[in-house]
Image (spheres, rainbow, N blue to C red):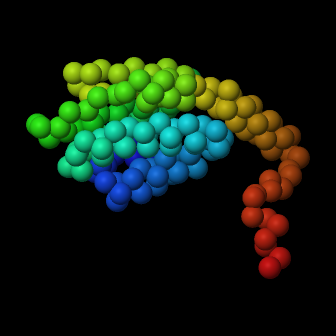
Amino acid sequence: MNKHIAIQANNHGFRALENFVEELSDSLQLEHTYYGNIMTSLSLLHELAHANDEGNHLVVDFEVSHEGLLFDVVIETSENSDVALNESASLLLDRLTDNFKFDTEKVQFSMFFDTKSVFSLMAKNRAEHLKSYLKGTTEKITKHNDSLQGY
């Protein structure tokens, strides 16, 4: 999975951003609310970059830890392009994230999503499955598409 992606500030870049967030969400098994908050936050920054100049790029780096997800987003602009975060966008990003910072000089955004409860639950479930396996008791783990196997 990519931990770094550079995206053009245009419609093609938006589709790449959607794929990036979907891949991240699937691989980390994030709940839909986290997916929605991450996608909306990054979409807002993409729109901010796109509104000023289609030549701009959105550079996204992220880290995964047991505490959560940290996204560092830089909008790379041309010399004559100016990126400013308005009050409503700032308020929205502040509400969608658990921690949000904006460096106006570097045009860098830092967004943190606290997912430790999700990761703790997954670790607990995995530990229980491992204990069952080691005891010799097995059970079939159903997948979301098992009901479609008969067709």
The image quarter containing residue 125 is: top right
Q: Which residue is drawn at 65% across and 43% down?
A: 32
Q: Position of residue 94 (x, y in %)?
A: 50, 23
Looking at the image, the residue that sits furthest to the right is: 137
Q: Is residue 112 above or below residue 4?
A: above
Q: How many numbered circles are shown?
A: 0
Q: Position of residue 54 (x, y in %)?
A: 24, 50
In this rendering, would 95 be left or right of 110? right
Q: Which residue is drawn at 86% across and 52% down?
A: 139
Q: Is residue 36 visible?
A: yes
The image quarter containing residue 102 is: top left
Q: Where is residue 17 in the image (x, y as percent from the top left)?
A: 41, 50
Q: Residue at x 12, y 37 (%)?
A: 80
Q: Residue at x 80, y 79 (%)?
A: 151
In this rendering, would 77 be left or right of 119? left
Looking at the image, the residue that sits furthest to the left is: 79
128 vs 8, nearest the viewer: 8
Looking at the image, the residue that sits furthest to the bottom is: 151
Q: Can residue 27 be seen in this view?
A: no
56 vs 124, nearest the viewer: 56
